[in-house]
Image (cartoon, helix red, strand yellow):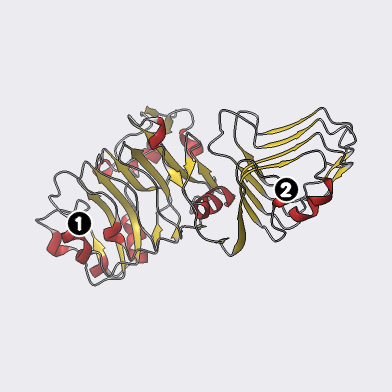
Amino acid sequence: MRLFLIFSFFFSFQCSDENWFQTKCDQKCIFQLGSLDSNNLNLFPKNCSSICADLVIDEDSNLTEKELIPTFKNVKTIFGTIIISRTNLTSLKFLAGLVSLECDEIPSDSDYKSGFIDLLTFSRFQKNFCFNPNPKNGLKLYKDFEMTEIGMLKWTNTTCSVEVEMYKTFSNFNVPNLKNFNSSDPSEHKIYIQYDYFGIISQNYVCFSLEETSSFYGAENVVMSYQNQKYCDHSSSTVLGEQFCNVSENENIKNLEENCQRIFGILKIGPGDEKFVYKLKNVTWIYGQLIIENTNLTSINFLNNLGFVISFDNYWKRSSLQILQNKNLMEIKLPNLKKVLGECNPFVITGNNGNFANF
């Protein structure tokens, strides 16, 4: 007979396996206490570049950013988890040197879809009440009312999921180099980036940089929350080494530069624009919308490198990729298209001539 236990979705915290810690860190670099506070700060392995710990910094820690910065100055890799709760911290910039956050394997998300887990599995995690049915929450921020951003500028690699409660002061993630997501979960291979708003009005929605958008939505194993959000301002002429073009509100393809690879804005192709579509041959990303409407095109075969069309600002208003009322259109070729995101129906094809057997 099999026994089942029922838990709410956010139950306590998960802990890493002690044996796993032993394989990852020297004994002197394992911080066993978990909760970091002013009383045990002197026991933290400050001289280790790689540490093993399930860190908790909360209202009882009584630690300032000024105290935390020298504590974590040498830390480049953390094996374990980081919980920040009910503090006065405005960011995690005290982890300025952190490059990698890696989590122990725990039961996959599929084990918890019904809200049940067998007793044998639970027994592995009940010690110290360190259990969470949401897999691999390596970084969790909640009830941090002064937090404005994550702000870990060197953070590049993770095998962990991220969960953030955002309040009115929280403006952006600011993790521009986070791009390598190597999930340690052998059954699901998913990493979840979850965030929820608490009392935020519309003009204060979180923004994501174009680099973050590319890394998060471009990774096959990352599952992103998709709520009201917006793009951060972008001032560079490139995005991840590719040429960036900003399309103004009333601009069409006629005025578009010929070397664009990443396009921001709403790009419209209409009557008379057919001879300019060659400009899109190198485009890989569109951060916004692409609308092809009322043209005389017979084939859409000029977007061979387009992989992503991701719209934030117009989530509830318009579809991200629209191919409309092109009466002569017989063929659509989008061989590298991987993801279209925006609105309830992000990709709309209607009013055209062909049956699109080649699409």
Q: Amino acid at mark 1?
A: Glu
Residue depicted at 11% across the width and 55% down the height? 38
User: Which residue is identified by label 2?
Assistant: 253
Number of the front mark, 2 or 1 = 2
Relative height, residue 264 to residue 353 (above, below): below
Q: Amino acid at mark 2?
A: Ile
Q: What is the quadrant of residue 342 in the picture? A: top right
Q: What is the quadrant of residue 121 in the picture? A: top left
Query: Furthest-left residue in view?
Result: 39
Assign a secondary structure to mark 2: helix
User: Which residue is identified by label 1?
Assistant: 65
Q: Quadrant of the C terminus?
A: top right
Q: Nearer the viewer, residue 303 or 109?
A: 303
Assign a secondary structure to mark 1: helix
Give the number of the disc on residue 313.
none
Left or right: 212 in relation to 21: right
Residue 286 at x, y = what percent? 64, 48
Q: Earlier in the sequence, mark 2 or mark 1?
A: 1
Residue at mark 2 to residue at mark 1: CA–CA distance = 49 Å
Residue depicted at 56% across the width and 61% down the height? 237
Relative height, residue 328 to residue 175 (above, below): above
